[in-house]
Image (spheres, rainbow, N blue to C red):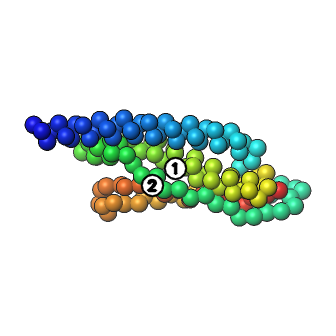
């Protein structure tokens, strides 16, 4: 009985703090994306006319899954189907990598990023089933 109570407490703590952390991260992303909105990003290889400088920029992030989502994914894995618990994890990682790339472009006084590419990788805790975190690497050519 005490063991079950301990597991339920851990799940509740994971849910509570995971939600708070995720909400804070999304709020931070919203603010930083708004600050960097002047930098346009395209995935095309076409470079506009009038470019005076270019530099390679990148952004990389590794985000770990929280305890509650790990439990939810394990339960979903038993019955199969879409892993909805990972959707926000992947979105946060993708947006954070792009913000970091745009921050590097802003530090170089660039106003446009062309040829955006995103690479993703799952960092496995256990090579068979347990995803510990996700890595997203964003890169492109910053232009001025």
Task: Point out residue 131 in the picture as x, y percentages from the top left corner.
Answer: 36, 55
Residue 16: tell me if it is visible: yes
Q: Which residue is mark 2?
A: 134
Residue located 24% across and 45% down the image? 78
User: Mark 2 or 1 closer to N-term?
Assistant: 1
Tell me the quadrant of the picture where the C terminus can be found: bottom right
| Quadrant position of residue 84 | top left
- Give the SS element for disc 2: strand
Of residue 20 and residue 95, the one placed in the foreground of this image is: 20
Task: Point out residue 7 in the picture as x, y percentages from the top left corner.
Answer: 21, 41
Q: Which residue is mark 1?
A: 93
Neighbor class of circle 1 (other Cα within 10 Å; few <14, some 14-19, many 20+) is: many
- Give the SS element for disc 1: helix
Q: In the picture provided, is 141 more to the left or to the right than 80?
A: right
Task: Point out residue 54 in the picture as x, y percentages from the top left corner.
Answer: 79, 63
Residue located 58% across and 47% down the image? 95
């Amino acid at each position: 009985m005490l063991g079950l109570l301990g597991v339920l407490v851990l799940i509740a703590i994971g849910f509570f703090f995971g939600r708070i952390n995720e909400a804070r991260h999304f709020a931070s992303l919203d603010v930083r994306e708004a600050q960097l909105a002047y930098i346009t990003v395209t995935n095309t290889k076409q470079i506009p006319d009038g470019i005076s400088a270019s530099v390679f920029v990148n952004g990389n992030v590794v985000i770990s899954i929280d305890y509650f989502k790990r439990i939810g994914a394990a339960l979903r894995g038993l019955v199969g189907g879409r892993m909805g618990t990972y959707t926000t994890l992947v979105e946060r990682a993708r947006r954070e990598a792009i913000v970091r790339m745009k921050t590097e472009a802003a530090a170089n006084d660039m106003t446009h990023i062309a040829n955006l590419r995103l690479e993703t990788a799952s960092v496995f805790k256990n090579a068979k089933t347990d995803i510990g975190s996700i890595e997203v690497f964003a890169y492109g050519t910053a232009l001025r």
